[in-house]
Image (cartoon, rainbow, N blue to C red):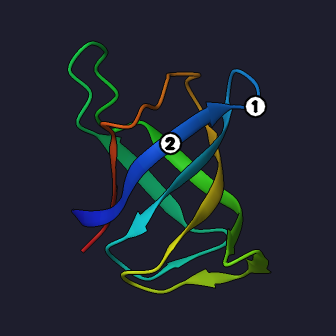
Amino acid sequence: MRAALKISRATALDAYTWLVEGRAYADLGVGGAVQACGRSDVDVSGEAFRILTMSTYGRSVDRLDKMLTGYLTLRGNRGLSLTESTMLLVES
């Protein structure tokens, strides 16, 4: 696994869906999967999220390139919380 996105802000849209803002450390695409890592108060390691939408610089995009900042809408399968301390990972 390698770093994909460092979350700087996370907002719950419902129990399973999140709008996150952050910087990409890997190329990401709509429909791709990421895993959460780095929470100390709740173990979210291995929590899978699907990327539903993404935007950068005020435009909807299908791909967020490495080192760009943007917003991602994520859908999880266990209903756990994301915070600013969470790092998202992708398969190497």
Locate the N terminus by quadrant.
Answer: bottom left
Q: Amino acid at mark 2?
A: Arg
Please state, as top left, top right, bottom left or bottom right, where the C terminus lies in the image: bottom left
Q: How many marks?
A: 2
Nearer the observer, 31 or 58: 58
**Mark number for residue 83?**
none
Asked which quadrant contains residue 78, the reply is top right
Q: Residues within 10 Å of mark 2 (few under 14, many from 20)?
A: some
Q: Is residue 49 left or right of residue 46?
A: right
Single out the mark in the foreground, 2 or 1: 2
Location of residue 42 (image quadrant): top left
Q: Compared with residue 78, is residue 66 higher up or lower down, i.e. above or below?
A: below
Which residue is most to the front? Answer: 57
The one nearer the camera, 64 or 30, is 64
Q: Is residue 49 above or below residue 16?
A: below
Position above or below: 49 against 83: below
- Horizontal side of 81 relative to 4 (left or right) equals right
User: In whole angstroms, how far apart are the C-alphas of marks 2 and 1?
Assistant: 13 Å
User: What SS does tag 1 mark?
Assistant: loop
**Badge 1 is on which residue?**
13
Q: Residue at x 31, y 73 (%)?
A: 25
Task: Please rate how many residues cluster around mark 1, counting C-alpha atoms within 10 Å: few if below 14, some from 14 to 19, many from 20.
Answer: few
Please state the horizontal and vertical placement of residue 52, each as a whole percent of the image: 72, 59
**Label at residue 9:** 2
Give the x, y percent position of residue 40. Answer: 20, 20
Where residue 82 appears, as percent x and y from the top left, is: 46, 31
